[in-house]
Amino acid sequence: MSHYYFIPHTKIDQILSYFKGNGYKCLAPRHLEGGISYAPISKAEDLPWGYVDEQKPGHYQITKTESPQAFGFTVPTASVKPMLFKAKETVWKVKRDDSGKLAFESVVDVEKIAVFGVRPCDLRGIEIQDRVFQHNSYNDIRYSKRRENQFIIAMNCGTSHFNCFCVALGDYPRADKGYDLALTEINAGFVAEIGSDKGRELLLYLEVDAATGAEVEHALNLIDNAAQMQHKQLPPIKEVEAKLMANLEHEAWDDVASRCLSCGSCTNSCPTCFCHTERDIPNVLGTETEHTREWDSCFSIDHSYTHGETYRENPKYRYRQWLTHKFSTWRDQFRTKGCVGCGRCVTWCPVKIDVVDEINTICK
């Protein structure tokens, strides 16, 4: 069989019908409230046809064009993370019966989700979070169940925005693993590659033809062009990891702390950040309690509160903790780097702090 196939745009509705028939809820990028975000779709026209985005430090803007493409933008405002690691959820409940006995109930909220159009950087974000929630000493049952029930159609990049830097991290704007199907959008459809048996079954259902040599060449050229559009540079990642930890008292930490608002926009938009807090919420009668988990940020002053003491009161130490964990000690903890180069932390920083610039300053 051919390694590449061609799926015309006209078959998108057939793909959505396949997902619906197999019990999947399909999420894909949509144009909503001035941005492009993942949301449920039911028909091809729900996709953001013709929209392109502009992202710079502290800047995000989308524009409607005459382009015939549905995926002419770079990355959605948020990654796939909220589908697997929910921003807030109940993890267990406990009830007290009339005799005073407590009964615990685990809460696992899972549905089959097909994600149409996952960019390569967000695919690598899933791989990193797999190590955090599944391949670590701790295995999160909610995350694992959602991963088991997920169908991923990756979408290789045809363009990069100003803040993208996956290439500087040694990656490439092309999906290399972790998908069921990987697509590259060209003029009237997609060049497709199979990543799993589930992806193969979908292609058989669609009854598509092999891609021509010209279509494959066009797709690969688009990906190469997206890589060449990235201008940010970093030292080799091993060098970054070593130099950050060797410069914990560098004057740059004070400089960035004078600008950082500790708002947490960077961690909230990051595909790999996983800090969270847990709370118990009792009812007014004292007969039932919900134990919840919700996203937290290492930029929150309460996040370092331990045993009656706050260890990172100064924003300098909170920023240093975030940067050194993300780009250095993460590897010791999870055997991988902690950043995928999507650039969202730069786009959504209200004071335009660029993490690549900060790293280069400290690593000089």
Image (tube, rainbow, N blue to C red):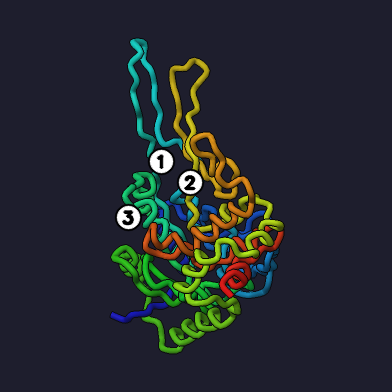
Q: Amino acid at mark 2?
A: Lys
Q: Quadrant of the N terminus?
A: bottom left
> Distance between the Cα atoms at labels 3 and 1?
21 Å
Measured as percent of width and height from the top left, residue 215 is found at 46, 84
Pointer 1: what residue?
Answer: 109
Q: Quadrant of the C terminus?
A: bottom right
**Closer to the eye: label 3 or 1:** 3
Pointer 2: what residue?
Answer: 86
Q: Pointer 1 and pointer 2: residues touching (CB < 8 Å)?
A: yes
Element assignment for label 1: loop
**Residue 201 sits in quarter:** bottom left
Measured as percent of width and height from the top left, residue 18 is found at 39, 59
Q: Which mark is residue 135?
A: 3
**Depth order, front residue of 29/163:** 163
> Distance between the Cα atoms at labels 2 and 3?
19 Å
**Depth order, front residue of 135/255:** 255
**Depth order, front residue of 170/106:** 170
Write the residue at 39% across / 21% down.
95
Label 3 Cα crowd, 10 Å radius (few <14 / some 14-19 / many 20+) = few
Whether residue 122 can be seen here: no
Measured as percent of width and height from the top left, residue 245 is found at 50, 64
Whether residue 152 can be seen here: yes
> Distance between the Cα atoms at labels 1 and 2?
10 Å
Q: Which mark is residue 84?
A: none
Q: Earlier in the sequence, mark 2 or mark 3?
A: 2
Measured as percent of width and height from the top left, residue 311 is found at 55, 44
Q: Earlier in the sequence, mark 3 or mark 1?
A: 1
Write the residue at 47% across / 35% down.
292
Give the vertical position of 105 relative to 28 (above or below).
Answer: above
Write the residue at 46% across / 55% down.
26
**Closer to the eye: label 1 or 2:** 2
